[in-house]
Each structure stands twice: as C-alpha cells, then as structure tokens.
Image: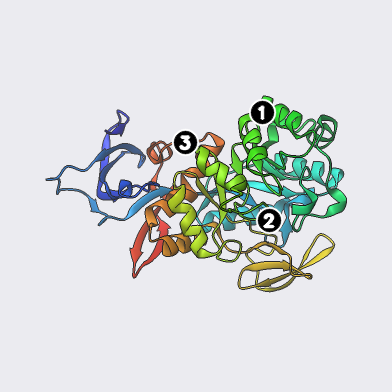
Amino acid sequence: MAAEASVALMHRITNVRLPAPLPGEGDQRYAIDLNDQGLICRIGAMEADERTADADWNGNWLSPRGVDLQINGGLGLAFPELTPADLPRLEELLDLLWRDGVEAIAPTLVTCGIAPLRQALAVLQQARQQHPPGRCRLLGAHLEGPFLAEARRGAHPREHLANPSLEALEERIGGFETEIALVTLAPELEGAAAVIERLQDLGINVALGHSAANDEQARAGFDQGVGMLTHAFNAMPGLHHRAPGPLGEACRRGGIALGLIADGVHVHPTMAALLQRLAPEQIVLVSDALAPYGLTDGKHRWDERVLLVEKGTCRLNDGTLAGVTLPQLEGVKRLARWSNAPSAAIWSATVAPRRVIGDATQCMDALMGRPLTQLLRWREEEDDLHWACAA
C-alpha cells in the first residue's frame, strides 16, 4: 500500500528499507518518489521487476531524524539553570543536536527550585518562538520531578522534591501549561492521582519514573493515563519472577512507551536486547544527556555539584549514576549491535518517540512531504550501523 500525494514527479529512489520494530518488517523494499521541489510525494512497495531508478539504495534504511524525549542539556548548559543570557549557547546546542542527527528534543528539567524552573520554562518558550529551519526543534519541556519517590530519587536533589498536589503543580507550571510535553512522577505517592488527572486534562503526557511502585500501583497509574516509563530499569523496581514491578506490568499490558538509555551502563546490553525482544513496539531510545554533552571527559559543574565524566558516563562524587554525554543516535548503534536488530533500533529513536508526542504513528507518516536533507540514511557495514544525511 502506497502513501502518496498528487504532485509532479522529479526523482525516484529504489531498494529502500524503512525501519520497523518487528522482525522481518524492516526487510520490505520500497520505491520512493520525490516531486519537483525535492519532497517525498509517494512511498510504495517496490515491484519485483522494478529496475529503473535515479538511485538504488542497496537496501539502506531511510528514517526521519531522532526525537529525544529525555535530554538535560549540553555544551555546559543545564536546562534547569537557563537564563535569558544563555539563549545564544542554547542555539549552538540545537545546531549541534541537528548535526548529531536529532530533529527535536523535549528539554528535560530535573528536580530544582520553583523560581529556576519557571525561569527555565520562560527561556525555552522564547527560544521555541525563534526556531529557524535546519536546527533541532524544541518540543515542550519534560519535567522530571519534583513528585518523585525519595528512595528512588537517584541524582535528584532531596531538598527540591515535593509531595504531589494540585497546588504544588500550579506553583510550578501555572501560565506555562502549553510549554510542557511530559511530566515524570511516582504514581504511588499520595496525591499523585489528582496530579495525573490534571495533567491529562491539560494534554500533557505523564511518565512513571523515580518510583517505588509495585506492579499493582503501576497498573493503577497506567489506568489513570500514565503512558511511559522514564529510563526503564533505572530508579524503579526491577524485573523479578515474583515481583514484576512497573516494567513487568508495562510489558504485560502493552502500549506503554519504555524509555531506554542504551549506553551499556544504565542498562546492561543483555537486558537492553532482552527488553527489545520482549516489547519491540514499546522501546523509545533516549540519551539522558547532561550538560557536558558535546564537551570532553573530566570534571564538570552541575548546579552546586561536580559531575565526573568518563567514557561518556556521568557520575556524582559519591558514585551515583547521573546520566551520559553520548548522542542519542550512538544509542541506536549500540542497541543494534547488542540485539542484532538494526531496523528496530533505528525505529526506536526516530519513529517511536513521535508516537508518544502524537507527531506520527508510522514511519511513512514522518517521511511524507519531507526533503531528503531533513532525513537520515542508514547503512550496515561490518555488523555496525552508520548514518548520514539522506541527501
């Protein structure tokens, strides 16, 4: 079945694969037509006897750019600390992200004080209004906290955690309701149900994270509208044969996005590959990149604390795992290597996040009407994935 638009044809490429989550789905070969403006106007299954084309892609994959729903900063910039003076550096970061193959991000604001949070939301709002073509786009913010379980807070500062309530929510997001795409919270906390309901009414996605919820508490959260796990496995009960926890319940239920940091440290490669086999249509690759993203390893400041960065992994002085500095698409390459499922790995960073934010549900939807200059071409070489701009 072809997706198409009635426009004059200019160029055709054939022998193209589109990423898909299930085994075998990504093997279908397609012919793709571009109109006289260089925009994709038709995507159809390649005919068995089809030979003539302007370009044969030899089975390379075509995908949209990545969408990162959990990234905390970069180039030394931490999103919760944004001030108006940081706008030029924020633009530099968005340019870097575009070069790193990322089309859009949900700038993540970890638990912090109310005044800095609101200031950061105001700066992000201003930056979003100034977006030019050819630069990574700012989606609504991802508020990771402050309604988190203290026992699972990880690197989040204890002094800024808060008990969930409508009053506490209003203090933080009042006036910025349309500037927020996602909120991570612990649904088992008293008062969380009312906050989840309010966020649902506002059209804001809700994720379970930094939570001590068991499977029953997680199920109640999913019933209320929680649609994602923030960094699956991390800062939550793990999978156990007698205690499935949030992750087990999410996999059993289906339809719950599973944010995954594929650096090999947050989640062991075997467990990452196992999760992909268990729930391939639910995996959403995130970077969880911190302020030192784009900088060298070493010591870096993070609020009043010091981050120790080694081989792309960030830890606090006490050894607490805080995040990474690896690009999102590096996670695609690693997951593809561990799981031997390159098509699914590509899909999990480029199409799956769009499902969460309601941008597109299928790869074709994300490709139609786009120029190749905004898309990615992936090839497999010596059991490793490589990507480049598609044109």
Q: At numbered mark 3, what does the secondary structure look like: helix, strand or loop?
A: loop
Looking at the image, which residue sits at the far front? 242
- Pick whichever, 150 or 217, lies toward us: 217
Indicate the position of residue 143 as horizontal and vertical percent values.
72, 43
Image point (68%, 56%), residue name: 73
Mark 3: amino acid: Ala
Task: Please give the name of the residue rendered at 61% of the width and 30% of the height, measured from the top-left corner.
Answer: 223
For label 3, the residue is: 360
Instruction: Judge the density around disc 3: few (<14), some (14-19), many (≥20) Cα neighbours within 10 Å.
Output: some
Q: Which colour scheme is used?
A: rainbow
Q: Residue at x 52, y 37 (%)?
A: 253
Query: Which quadrant holds residue 43?
Result: top left
Is residue 105 at least partly visible in the picture?
no
The reply to whether discs 1 and 2 touch (Cβ–Cβ < 8 Å) is no
* Residue wearing tag 1: 200
Check whether the beta carbons of the residues at disc 1 and disc 3 lie within 8 A of each other: no
Q: Tag 2: residue type?
A: Gly
Sequence-wise first label, 1 or 2? 2
Residue 39 visible (yes or no): yes
Judging by the rendered image, the residue that carries numbered circle 2 is 73
The kind of residue on which mark 1 rests is Gln
Q: Where is residue 110 in the image (x, y as percent from the top left)?
A: 74, 50
* The N terminus sits in image quarter: top left
Binning the other alpha carbons within 10 Å of mark 2 as few (below 14), some (14 to 19) or many (20 upward) gives: many
**In the displayed image of the protein, which residue is found farthest to the top?**
201
Sequence-wise, the earlier of marks 3 and 2 is 2
